[in-house]
Amino acid sequence: MTNDRHTGKAASGRRWPVAIAAALGGCALVAASTVPAAAHGKAHGRATDYVSLGDSYTSGPLIPAQVDANCARSNRNYPSLVAAARGVATFKDMSCGGATTEHMWTAQGTNDPQLSALRRDTDLVTLQIGGNDMGFGTIIATCAALGVQEPTGDPCRRHYTASGTDELTAAIDRTAPKVARVLKAVHAKAPHARVLVVGYPDLLPDDGVGCFPTVPFGSKDFPYLRDTEKRLNSMLRTVAERHHVEYVDTYGPTRGHDMCKAPEDRWIEPLQPTSPAAPAHPNAKGEAVMAQAVLDHLDKGHGHGHDHGHGRH
């Protein structure tokens, strides 16, 4: 994910937090990959025309095989796994590392505006966006730099609440209408599509117990940052419901496999990864679990969101 000037400046003068910020946000960009119909085609009924929209949690940076270096896009990211499992007719993966909601309408380098892939006959869309709008990369780099100075305290929470207002909660609140705007545009361009908003996976221990120095946050900041991610996911769920689309929970399925777990047990890599993945991002196992969450949701047969007049919301 990338940095956001509205959520505070990372501490300076410490080389490795700066490197983390660069790794979290420094993804360049290229055109979307398009996958033709799988040979087994219509195993789930009429073959689906599927478009994936999203940021680096969708694209799968550094996970082999990288098929789009400029967008840090893997052919083992969750949309690719969903497309293969469903035997879709067409698949356009527009996800790109560093994407914000603005990149739905504007190009990211040579990656076209993500919404440009949608057509009136598109019938499945997944969307995972919002983390970069709230400045997720800056938040992690800032909290890591502060945690090194005060490993047993809550310097990150104090930093983001020093004004008397929780800046991270405010950033989430500012992001909500941006995600809503994206959903309105999706409905306008693909009015018959089944639309799934995909939440973010469990990054930090759900019990709030830290793991310094593997993840160098202050011990009392772990529950604060955990709760911040939960607020982000709650916002995404609420916006999805208000726009009559579906929400896919990936936090629950990944709980207990956060970046503090042992290498063989974690599905999210820490700030110094030991498996091919970007810092604080899903590895291949994490992408596979998110894919399964999407597939399970699709198989539940929730409403497809057709003809609800979503563009009016």
Image (cartoon, rainbow, N blue to C red):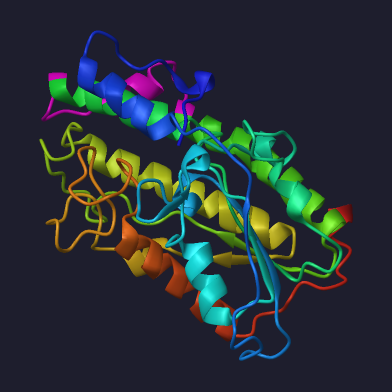
Q: Is residue 148 above or below residue 78?
A: above
Q: Position of residue 254 (x, y in %)?
A: 33, 64
Q: Residue at x 71, y 79 (%)?
A: 303
Q: Quadrant of residue 266?
A: bottom left
Residue 244: say if magenta.
no
Q: Is residue 173 left or right of residue 178?
A: left
Q: Is residue 227 above or below residue 118?
A: above
Q: Is residue 237 above or below residue 288?
A: above
Residue closest to the eye, 214 or 76 = 76
Residue closest to the eye, 89 or 302 = 89
Q: Which residues are magenta?
A: 149-167
Q: Is residue 3 above or below residue 255?
A: above
Q: Position of residue 213 (x, y in %)?
A: 10, 35
Q: Residue at x 45, y 37 (%)?
A: 1
Residue 165: say if magenta.
yes
Q: Position of residue 59 (x, y in %)?
A: 49, 51
Q: Is residue 235 left or right of residue 267?
A: right
Residue closest to the eye, 258 or 156 = 258
Q: Is residue 188 left or right of residue 26?
A: right
Q: Position of residue 247 (x, y in %)?
A: 58, 65
